[in-house]
Structure formats: C-alpha cells, structure tokens
Image (cartoon, rainbow, N blue to C red):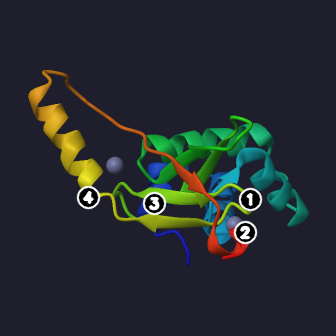
Amino acid sequence: MSAPADDLDLIGRHTAQRASVVRALIDHGGFVGAQTLHDVLKARGSRVGLNTVYRTLAALLDADRADVVHDRGGERLFRYRPSAEHRHYLVCRACDLSTAVDADVIETWAEHLARTSGFAEVEHTVELTGLCPQCCGS
Ligand SMILES: [Zn+2]
Ligand SMILES: [Zn+2]
C-alpha cells in the first residue's frame, strides 16, 4: 500500500524525509512508537532525524490520518489511518497485534453527548487492550 499523493499534502511540506516516515508507518501496518519507526528507517539507510519522525507523526494526527494508543509505559504508539474515518482498535498487550473493532455504540453515545451537553468540539479516546488468541493460548 502506498500513500496517495493527497495524503502527503496533509503532512505539510513535501519533503522526501517526511514521505519516507509516512511510508514506513504504512509498511509497519500496526501500532508503532516513534523511536521504533526511527530505528526501522535507520536500518533502511535513511538519515531521517528522530525529530522529523515526531513532527511527521504529529502532522498525521492533526490531519486525522493516524490513530494513537499508549503502551504500558505510557509511550504513544501510532498507526496509519487509511481514510479520515475514525476507528477504534483492540490491541494485544503482549505482541502489539491490533485489530479494528466495531464501535458504533460508542460513536452513537459520543455524538449524543456532544449534541446534548452544550460542549463544542467534543472528542473522545477509547483504548482497548487485551491478550490476542495467540498470546493467551486459547
Ligand atoms: Zn498477542
Ligand atoms: Zn470513536
């Protein structure tokens, strides 16, 4: 999967370095931390700096093109979001496997609260973690 051209517009200036960060995130396919992504890029011979990795991930978040969860140490892990549609994931605490889950109930509830609370720009974060079938041995 490659990033459509207009996705790369979303991350601001068209630098080859930023594009390589987005590509590495897409290639990874799951949730990954900035440091790990930086290591992957370095292993590929890229000279992208860790700050560029952080800035690119932040730009993707701003553009609604990334989902974020926190690992047990509190580190933020990012996953590329192929469309602007907001998703929720169930993430394995042991192996970081992630799978998108049906969250219609949560969306309906959050929209209802946003409409009735008097608050503007209501956002929500729901993080679900567990042990995947492989890791819990069932
Ligand atoms: Zn697992
Ligand atoms: Zn949601």
**Earlier-in-chain disc, 2 versus 1:** 1
Residue wearing tag 4: 104
Quarter of the rendering containing residue 84:
bottom left
Q: Secondary structure at mark 2?
A: helix
Q: Is residue 56 visible?
A: yes
Tag 3: amino acid: Asp
Residue sitting farthest toward the front: 138
- Circle 2 packing at 10 Å, graded few (<14), some (14-19), many (20+), is few
Q: Residue at 47% of width from left, 60% of height from top?
A: 81
Q: Quadrant of the N terminus?
A: bottom right
The answer to whether marks 2 and 1 mark residues whose Cβ atoms lie closer than 8 Å is yes
- Residue 107 image point, x, y percent: 25, 50
Answer few, some or many: residues within 10 Å of disc 1's Cα (few below 14, many 20 plus, some between 14 and 19). few
Mark 1 vs mark 4, CA separation in Å:
27 Å
> Which SS class for mark 4?
helix
Ligand 1 closer than 8 Å to the CB at disc 2? yes
Residue closest to the eye, 129 or 17: 129
Q: Where residue 4 sits: x, y (%)? A: 46, 70
As drawn, the residue found furthest toward the top would be 118
Out of 111 and 79, give the one closest to the viewer: 111
Q: Is residue 25 left or right of residue 108?
A: right
Residue under label 2: 135
Between marks 4 and 3 in the image, the one whose residue lies nearer the viewer: 4
Query: Residue 120: x percent and y percent?
Result: 20, 25
Left or right of residue 26, residue 73 in this image: right
